[in-house]
Image (spheres, helix red, strand yellow):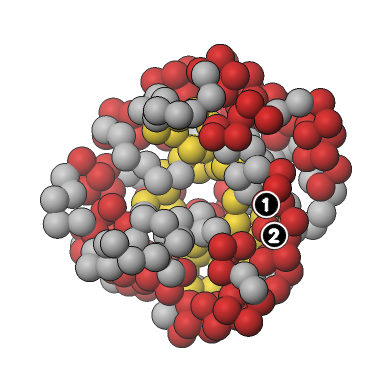
Amino acid sequence: MDFSTRGLFDTHVHLDEFLPRQQLEEEFRLAQEAGVRYFLVPGVSQDNWAAVFAATDAVEGAWAAPGIHPMAADNWDNEMEKALLEILASSKVVAIGEIGLDSSPGYPPAEIQEKTFRSQLRIAADHDLPVLIHCRKAWRRTLDILREEKSALRGGILHAFSASREIAEEAVSLNFAIGIGGPVTYPNARRIIEVVKELPEGNLVLETDAPDMPPHPYRGEPNRPLRLRIIAEKVAEIRGWSLDRVRDITTENALRILNLRE
């Protein structure tokens, strides 16, 4: 793909949620008008992998990161592992995600989540693929597992980062970028703004998580890919950069992490 015309890179967007194709193409057009050019579409369960590929096939500049979200960790078995291994042959696959740990009520037990997480980390390592990490209320354990599985050898992105500057620093030491999304724009945001201020510029990427996590002032509405620009503008304000500099740095970071440079 030609990367000479730069645009913003949304490193976590559920484009499959915008199917049918006509609706997706309209969202893509609006995103392009807002300066968003590239998209990484994560999987959450085997049931949505086909839709992930349908979405990435429908728009230019979109790639897939199939995986099993911790909410579906108890579905992981040998057959699912085999199915994941088979689809990794697609040229659209540039990462495995979103995978990780989540201690929210109603999720599978921790030991089941950890088993599924480790299995996917090993698959990613075997195929030299970065990972998209989902973590909620389990940051310390997540980092411990990443370290134990030697995931720093390939790295990846911590999606929807919400932890402290100290956790961010440790993640950076493990070769992970920090995904900055809608919460950085909230009027009461404090900790994530401190993280954005202090992050090495080589570890900063942007995301919408659309249709989830809308930025201010759209909270309470479904999020949309075009709103990545609002997040980029907030990062520019925090760092004292131009919007062009935010675009160039964060897009280059995403291309490097996902091995998409020409």
In the displayed structure image, the side of residue 1 where residue 244 appears, left or right: left
Q: Amino acid at mark 1?
A: Asn
Q: CA distance from mark 1 to mark 2?
A: 5 Å
Q: Residue at 48% across / 73% down in the picture?
A: 36
Q: Secondary structure at mark 1?
A: helix
In this figure, which residue is indicated by the disc labeled 2? 51
Q: Residue at 60% across / 57% down in the picture?
A: 41
Name of the residue lying farthest toward the front: 106
Instruction: Check if mark 1's residue and mark 2's residue have beta carbons within 8 Å.
Output: yes
Quadrant in which the C terminus is drawn: bottom right
Q: Residue at 54% across / 73% down in the picture?
A: 37
Q: Residue at 26% across / 54% down in the picture?
A: 184
In the displayed structure image, the side of residue 70 where residue 224 appears, left or right: left
Mark 2 Cα shell of 10 Å, populated few (<14), some (14-19), many (≥20): some
In this figure, which residue is indicated by the disc labeled 1? 48
Q: Secondary structure at mark 2?
A: helix
